[in-house]
Image (cartoon, rainbow, N blue to C red):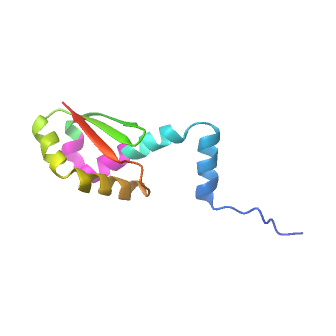
């Protein structure tokens, strides 16, 4: 029996599968939402009305403009933390609305 030389890491296989069935953007959307919840904590998550990833821009609707303003001051740190949680650079910008 010969060895199969067509071995690929599971991560690559899953990424190709998602692209083939056009699920990669939806998967990134879910990853971004999970990263937001884990990174920002329970309180901010409870004040988050909606979250949507459009390209590399994360749009977040938060109940409180004060919270949005506070997060905006730390925007680059938040983006870095979210991308670290996701495991690759998915988010380049964050937009907030109330």
* Dominant secondary-structure state across the stretch colored magenta: helix
Position of residue 64 measured from the top left corner of the image (x, y, whole percent): 13, 35
Is residue 69 left or right of 94 when viewed as pictured?
left
Position of residue 14 measured from the top left corner of the image (x, y, whole percent): 60, 50
Position of residue 52 measured from the top left corner of the image (x, y, whole percent): 36, 35
Is residue 1 left or right of 52 when viewed as pictured?
right
**Rendered residue at 35%/48% (across/down):** 92
| Quarter of the picture holding the N terminus | bottom right
Taking the magenta stretch, the answer to whether it contains residue 42 is yes
| Location of residue 78 with respect to 4 vertically, above or below | above
The quarter of the displayed image where residue 85 is located = bottom left
Is residue 60 left or right of 83 when viewed as pictured?
left
**Rendered residue at 18%/52% (across/down):** 74
Taking the magenta stretch, the answer to whether it contains residue 77 is no
Of all residues shown, which one is farthest toward the bottom? 2
* 55 or 83, nearer to the observer: 55
| Location of residue 1 with respect to 40 vertically, above or below | below
The quarter of the displayed image where residue 65 is located = top left
Of all residues shown, which one is farthest toward the left? 66
Position of residue 61 measured from the top left corner of the image (x, y, whole percent): 24, 33
| Quarter of the picture holding the C terminus | top left
**Rendered residue at 24%/42% (across/down):** 45
Image: magenta residue range: 33-45
């Amino acid at each position: 029996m010969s060895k199969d030389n067509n071995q690929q890491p599971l991560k690559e296989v899953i990424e190709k599968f998602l692209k083939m069935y056009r699920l990669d953007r939806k998967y990134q959307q879910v990853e971004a939402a999970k990263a937001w919840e884990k990174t920002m904590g329970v309180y901010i998550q409870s004040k988050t009305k909606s979250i949507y990833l459009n390209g590399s821009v994360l749009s977040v609707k938060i109940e409180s403009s004060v919270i949005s303003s506070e997060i905006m001051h730390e925007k680059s740190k938040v983006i870095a933390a979210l991308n670290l949680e996701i495991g690759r650079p998915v988010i380049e910008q964050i937009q907030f609305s109330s």
